[in-house]
Image: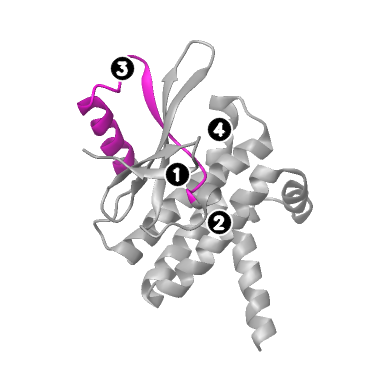
Amino acid sequence: MKRFVSALLVVILLADSAAALTNKEYFAMKKQDEHFREADDRLNELWKELKSIMPVKDFKALDKNREEWVRKGRENSVKDFMNDQNIDRVSAYTTATLERITYLAEIRLKYVYGTKAVTRDKAMEILKNYLQKNGKFGKNHIIMWEDYEPSCYFGEKDDGESWMLRHAVDGEDMIFTLGFYYVRVSDGAIYTLDLVNDEIIPVEE
């Protein structure tokens, strides 16, 4: 029975990340492209966690949303990314998967930290306001969302989960990074990344 449940879970997870692809295409992407593999694995982990923490009724509603995303939403996103950003198909699927991860991650945060948990967009707003207030946000400056979590660099933190953001200048030919920041999802506290000393430092208002 346990083996049957485990097998069924694998099918569900694969459906969330690869239903519109043939099995051959999906496994080829997983094997050949590191970025797609990491994004897909994270999506599967997140989906499994949501199933364990959400009430059955809420998860069923989310599952219907997942079916619509697999059937139509993801493919539309892939087409848009390929057309608008002029990227290849695998990169488009990776980007669409990261987009979906963000959507599910924000749902997860609300169940873990409550409805006032800081979303990615709110985190970007908080950081931008801080930089502007302190005269650090100049002409052509931008705030970018980073795909990886702080634990990728420093291991697990004891102050809760955070959104990773990049402060940069959008130049004519390239983007110049000015610094990396984290905004904590539980209360919006800001941290800066010290690459020299491998430290995450709280930012004082």
Please give the residue where the numbered disc 4 appears in the rendered image. Answer: 81
Q: Is residue 89 above or below residue 50?
A: above
The residue shown at (33%, 37%) is 124
Assess disc 4: are there few (<14), some (14-19) or many (≥20) residues with their C-alpha within 10 Å of its C-alpha. Answer: some
Which dot marks residue 43? 2
Which dot marks residue 138? 3
Which of marks 1 and 4 precedes in the sequence? Answer: 4
Which of marks 2 and 1 precedes in the sequence? Answer: 2
Please give the residue where the numbered disc 1 appears in the rendered image. Answer: 199
Q: Which quadrant of the figure has residue 88?
A: top right
Assess disc 2: are there few (<14), some (14-19) or many (≥20) residues with their C-alpha within 10 Å of its C-alpha. Answer: many
Q: Which residues are magenta?
A: 122-150
Residue 100 percent across, percent down from the top left: 49, 49
Q: Is residue 14 left or right of residue 179?
A: right
Assess disc 3: are there few (<14), some (14-19) or many (≥20) residues with their C-alpha within 10 Å of its C-alpha. Answer: few
Amino acid type, mark 1: Glu
